[in-house]
Image (cartoon, rainbow, N blue to C red):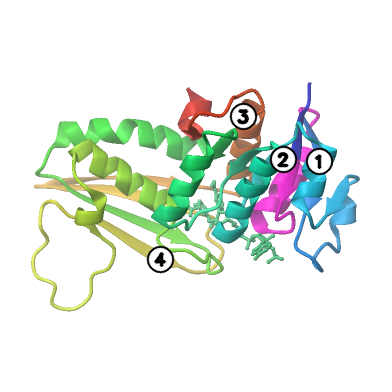
Amino acid sequence: MATEIIVLGAKGRMGSTIARLADNDPDYALCAVIEREGNTDGLEVYSTFVSTNLQDALLKYPSAVVIDFTVPKVSLDTVKCCKEVGGKAVIGTTGFSSEELSYLKENSKDISLLWAPNMSVGINVLLKILPQLVKILGEKYDLEISEIHHKFKKDAPSGTALKLAQCLAEARGVDLDKVGKFCRHGIIGERSSEEIGVQTLRGGDVVGDHTVYFLGPGERIEITHRAHSRETFAQGALRAAKWLAHQKPGKLYSMSDVLN
Ligand SMILES: NC(=O)C1=CN([C@@H]2O[C@H](COP(=O)(O)OP(=O)(O)OC[C@H]3O[C@@H](n4cnc5c(N)ncnc54)[C@H](OP(=O)(O)O)[C@@H]3O)[C@@H](O)[C@H]2O)C=CC1
Ligand SMILES: O=C(O)C1=N[C@H](C(=O)O)C[C@H](O)C1
């Protein structure tokens, strides 16, 4: 049976990619596309329900999974709305504060909710193997991350870079809030071995590149993931929605649950 989908932020870079793919794939039924008041022009290309109100769409399609790639404030409203009317949501938005992430976790007890800062298969496989590399290479290898994104991206560092840094910190048994180094400028002194550096580049139309560096004595390993198009993330979001449609609330799901 086709998975029913509601796409929020349907004119955004990610929202439009997801809506187009869902509309052309018999495994999905694009039930509704939602945009902000005054910004629905052009959405009639989808022969589906167009609205500025998520609640209206969820009441009309109670089994649909909402896919939301917008901004933190809007995604928090999506969670609130799903809780009020009983919907499920896949959230790809990044840039949440730790309090906002706690809000997602808290509400995942009541609604089926999945959040992942990167829905590509490649990044999620990388997250699985990084702890092994950290443990084998040990303390002598310095850990750094760099990311490059298009000039329109609003948050920094990327949600993926933060997730990768969190993964490295957990593998070393340290607190990222204490060892994360997000900016270097001026006479900063020698690098300490505990640091996990995260550096941000912005420009042009780069879809999303992430590199993890293991910088050791006499050698280094660099692992780079490059997304070739937004369809990589969009296909992941649709796969996540298909999976989430059959899940009960209980925890804040992530892509690792989907790919298991
Ligand atoms: N998890 C993953 O795999 C990925 C995550 N992302 C994340 O997804 C998010 C969106 O990225 P992207 O598609 O490039 O961004 P866009 O800016 O292209 O799209 C954002 C969408 O959100 C809507 N929006 C923004 N503010 C509001 C508001 N206050 N009220 C209602 N709607 C609003 C926009 O509508 P309007 O045009 O009217 O402003 C637009 O439709 C980002 O956080 C990004 O980091 C991106 C790629 C992959
Ligand atoms: O804003 C983007 O474009 C992307 N955002 C995500 C992030 O912040 O990690 C994922 C992807 O790299 C593209």
Q: Residue at x 68, y 59 (%)?
A: 12
The x, y position of residue 121, in whole percent, is: 50, 34
The mark nearer the N terminus, 2 or 1, is 1
Foreground tag (3 vs 1): 1
Q: Residue at x 63, y 40 (%)?
A: 89
Which residue lies under the disc numbered 1? 59
The mark nearer the N terminus, 4 or 3, is 4
Is 42 positioned to the left or the right of 260 in the image?
right
Residue 167 visible (yes or no): yes
Which residue lies under the disc numbered 2? 85
Foreground tag (1 vs 4): 1
* Amino acid type for the residue under numbered disc 3: Leu
* Amino acid type for the residue under numbered disc 1: Leu
- Is the residue marked by circle 2 packed among few (<14), some (14-19), or many (20+) residues within 10 Å? some
Question: Secondary structure under badge 4?
Answer: strand
The x, y position of residue 3, in whole percent, is: 74, 29
**Residue 71, relative to residue 120: is it above or below?**
below
Question: Which residue occupies the foreground of this view, 162 or 113?
Answer: 113
Give the CA separation, mark 2 to mark 4. 40 Å
Question: Secondary structure under badge 3?
Answer: helix
The mark nearer the N terminus, 3 or 1, is 1
Foreground tag (4 vs 3): 3
The mark nearer the N terminus, 2 or 4, is 2
